[in-house]
Amino acid sequence: MNKVQKTTLTLSQLQQLAHTTSRIGKFDICHFDELVSTQIYLLEMLKENELHAPIAVITNEQSSGLGSRDNSWSGGEGNFFASIALDLGMLPEDLPLGSASIYFSYLMKQTLASLGQNIWLKWPNDFYFNDDKVGGTITNKVNDTLVCGIGINLKNSQNGYRALQCDISPQKLLENYLLALEKFPKWKEVFSEYEVEFKLSRKFSVHIENDKKSLSDAILCEDGSLIIEGKRVFSLR
């Protein structure tokens, strides 16, 4: 899992951030106009027992969101910034925890497909439209809770990446995603579809321990890990 930055806000300041709440299925949803990071906010509030899973946090604007390899994912104006917390006991028994990013990401890919957006998932956690990245997923663990953060450029190109340029509202996407997630399909079902799609990743590279590795000859294993140059690698993101 990823190393997490800490917010500079105190617990009291975090508690006082203005937001509205709603509910979809088993999930409470906190809606914000602006946050530094949905992931950091949710992680901090879980650690302080101020929020409890299952819960989701979504914001219209994000100033310093967490991306892979300590990059940031920020912006607003109709783009998607959300984090979801789940108790580990809610997850499918056959899900390898090291491949949680693949699981959460692929369910989002399926959700977007149901809304007419044809994207694909580059191993292990990047959303692509054709050859262009449009978003990504990051996962962190707090005790027995898994927190998944997702950022997607729905409407406007930001963070150096293109956008889908679609009219799907972030709120509708989150609600549809949570309803899909609540069904908790088995890892085997998700992986059987992702395995077919993995061929699209082969013309790209991935960073492994700060080294850039080609995916052209990578072997995808049933637990979602890869074998690259004889070494087994999990996503752990």
Image (spheres, helix red, strand yellow):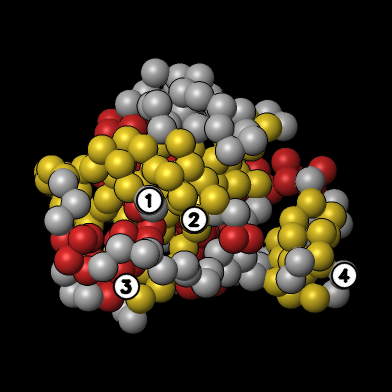
- Distance from Cα at disc 3 to Cα at disc 2: 18 Å
What label does residue 66 carry, if any?
2
Q: Amino acid at mark 2?
A: Leu
| Residue in front for this viewpoint, 192 or 130 | 130
**Residue annotated with mark 1:** 36
The quarter in which the C terminus is drawn is bottom right
Rendered location of residue 74, percent (x, y): 48, 42
Q: Quadrant of residue 7?
A: bottom left
**For this view, does 87 lie left or right of residue 111?**
left
Q: Quadrant of residue 111?
A: top left
Q: Residue at x 27, y 50 (%)?
A: 57
Q: Quadrant of residue 185?
A: bottom left
**Residue annotated with mark 4:** 229
Rendered location of residue 24, percent (x, y): 16, 44
- Lower sequence index among marks 3 and 1: 1
| Residue in front for this viewpoint, 22 or 99 | 22
Please rate how many residues cluster around mark 1, counting C-alpha atoms within 10 Å: few if below 14, some from 14 to 19, many from 20.
Answer: some
Q: Amino acid at mark 3?
A: Thr
- Label 4 SS: loop
The answer to whether marks 4 and 2 mark residues whose Cβ atoms lie closer than 8 Å is: no
**Residue annotated with mark 3:** 145
- Distance from Cα at disc 3 to Cα at disc 1: 21 Å
**For this view, does 203 lie left or right of residue 58?**
right
Q: Amino acid at mark 4?
A: Glu
Q: Is residue 69 visible to us here?
A: yes
| Residue in front for this viewpoint, 16 or 200 | 16
- Distance from Cα at disc 4 to Cα at disc 2: 29 Å
